[in-house]
Amino acid sequence: MCETSPAPLFFSVFPAPCVYPAHMAETQQVHADSSSNDESPEPRTFRSRRSFKASNMSFVEMVEMVDILKRDDYDGKYGPYLNPNVRKAKIMTKVVKSLHRNFGVRQSKDQLRKQWSDLKLREHDQYRKIRNLLLKDTG
C-alpha cells in the first residue's frame, strides 16, 4: 500500500515512489553494513596504467623523435590515410622503442605526444634547429 500525494502532471507519467518504513530500515541496514566493512578480507587493487617519471628530453633524444615522426609522416601531411589513429599509435610505439633502445629512456606515448605538440607549437626555435639539422644530415 503506497502513500501517494495528489498527483501533479509529472506523477501521472511516472508513478510516485512507495514509502515503506520496513523497506527503508532494510536499506539503511545494508548501507550501514557496507560502510562499516572497512577492513575487507580481499584488498581492492585497481590496475592502473604504467606511469613513467616525466623527465626533460635531451636535444639528441628530441632529434631522434622528430626524425622518426617526420620520416613516417606522423602529422599526415602527405595524404589521407586509413585509420589515422591506429597509424599514429604505431608510429609512437616506434618512437618509444627507439628511445629506449638508443638512450635507455622510458617515456609513455602520451608524454611523447605532448612533447611533440609542445615542440611544434611553443618551441619554434628549437624545432627549427632540429629540422635544419635533419635536413643537413639527409642532404
Image (cartoon, rainbow, N blue to C red):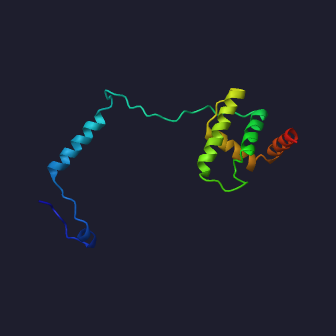
The residue sitting at 25% across, 66% down in the picture is 14
Question: Residue 29: image x %, image y %?
Answer: 21, 41
Q: Position of residue 52 (x, y in %)?
A: 60, 32
> Which residue is found at the position 29% from the left and 34% from the top?
36
Q: Locate residue 38: give its quadrant.
A: top left
| Along the line of sight, the residue nearer the viewer: 2 or 112 | 112
Q: Position of residue 15 (x, y in %)?
A: 22, 65
Where's residue 68, x and y in %?
73, 40
* Farthest residue, direction left: 1
* Residue 101 lies in quadrant: top right
Position of the N terminus by quadrant: bottom left
Taking the spot 29% from the left edge, 32% from the top edge, the residue there is: 37
- Residue at the far bottom in the pictured view: 9
- In the figure, is residue 24 to the left or right of 119? left
The correct choice, above or below, for 106 with respect to 139 in the image is: above
Q: Quarter holding the C terminus?
A: top right
